[in-house]
Image: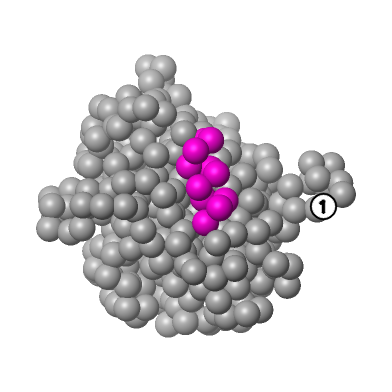
Amino acid sequence: MSDSSLGRKVGRVVARQHRKSGADEIAVSVFCEKTGETVHAAAGQQVGGPVDAQTPFFLASTTKLFATALVLQLRSEGLLELDEPITRYLGAATLSGLHRIGGRDFSGEITVRHLLSHTSGLPDYFEEKRRDGSRLATNLLAGTDARWSLDDVLAATRHDLAPHFRPGEARKALYSDTNHQLLGGVIESVTDQPLAQLVKVRIADRLALTRTYLFDADTASTRPAVLPLRNSASRPAIPQAIESTRLDGGGVSSSAELLEFIRAFFDGRLFPAEDVPALFDWRAVFFPLQYGVGVMRLKLPWFFSPFAPQPELVGHSGISGAFAFWSPEKRVFLSGTVNQLANRSLPYRFMLQVLAAVEPA
């Protein structure tokens, strides 16, 4: 815990959550733009000692920010365009029949922007029920490991799932991990490089991050131990599945490194800063979260806290309990994890408690 007034306040929030929430491991890093102060706080044990700001953890869907950064880099280099159909990058044959409604195939109308903003209408291969009644996410959380490829995701989307609306239909959005599987394919197609290498060179190396990467089950033993996934009291061991999620959920980082990443995401060190405002085109996905173009927004309605309105948070979270957000109002960045799959609201409640501990900007 940082030895400052702010550090002690954040440390008390962490200690309180560790006692009350059932989260075995918690880590948070905070940067206050107003004062220039960075603080870290953590609780719990890892292999070899206490959890700290350098302890690696699984990012789950917070990884989607890597996809956004990569796409915007490639656009700035003239290698892709947000409003181009993805058939330009993946080929019409690869996508044929993927998005059928009323006997018409809309696959050729899906653009990169649709994928980034979850406005493609494609179903979610990860959480939606398939024809046999199964859900991939349910099986994985029960500890049944599996490996899959983009081709497997496309096959499941065609044969076991159904689209929800036409690509780009007005004001509609559906959060779907299928979108980011396709984005991974687009990115690999235009660069002719594997995603893990792109994350390393274009994100981690650029920011001098050594514990931020896409998970690889075969090389995991050569890296510092990652906190185990926790689903209530169980610890699902699903390394093949984590690797298979790629840009929709396969990232690893620490609270300190994730803080550096989320700062760089918004300050122009990864892609042009002037691209940021255009990301804030919000649509509801699931209450109280909204989605823009590659970023998530948390803004509680006034009636949840009528006498002390809660600040807006922009960034991303993951089912693992990981988070990386910026509060424009408070001028604060925060990142970390509560490392718990079973309590999806916990990271949001925890972040708001941390923000409350920070002096107003």
Left or right of residue 302: residue 135 = left
- In the rendered image, the residue lying farthest to the right is 307
Q: Nearer the viewer, residue 284 or 123?
A: 284
Q: Residue 19, how many percent across, how many down?
A: 49, 38
Task: Give the crowd class for mark 1: few <14, some 14-19, many >=20 residues within 10 Å.
Answer: few
Q: Please give the name of the residue rendered at 57% of the width and 51% of the height, measured from the top-left corner.
A: 13
Q: Quadrant of the N terminus?
A: bottom left
Left or right of residue 314: residue 76 = left
Residue 16: in magenta span: yes
Find numbered disc 1 in the image and state the secondary structure of the residue it sits on: loop
Q: Nearer the viewer, residue 194 or 4?
A: 4
Q: Which residue is mark 1?
A: 308
Q: Quadrant of the C terminus?
A: bottom right
Answer whether residue 184 is visible to the viewer in this image: no
Q: Amino acid at mark 1?
A: Ala
How many marks the image carries: the answer is 1
Q: Residue 227, how many percent across, how many down?
A: 30, 47
Q: Look at the magenta stretch and give its main secondary structure.
A: helix
Residue 76: in magenta span: no
Q: Please give the name of the residue rendered at 52% of the width and 81% of the height, measured from the top-left corner.
A: 268
Q: Nearer the viewer, residue 81 or 134?
A: 134
Q: What range is drawn magenta here? A: 11-21
Q: Residue 16, how many percent across, how many down?
A: 55, 44
Q: Please give the name of the residue rendered at 39% of the width and 68% of the height, measured from the top-left corner.
A: 257
Answer whether residue 231 is visible to the viewer in this image: yes
Query: Where on the picture, by quarter, is residue 198?
Result: bottom left
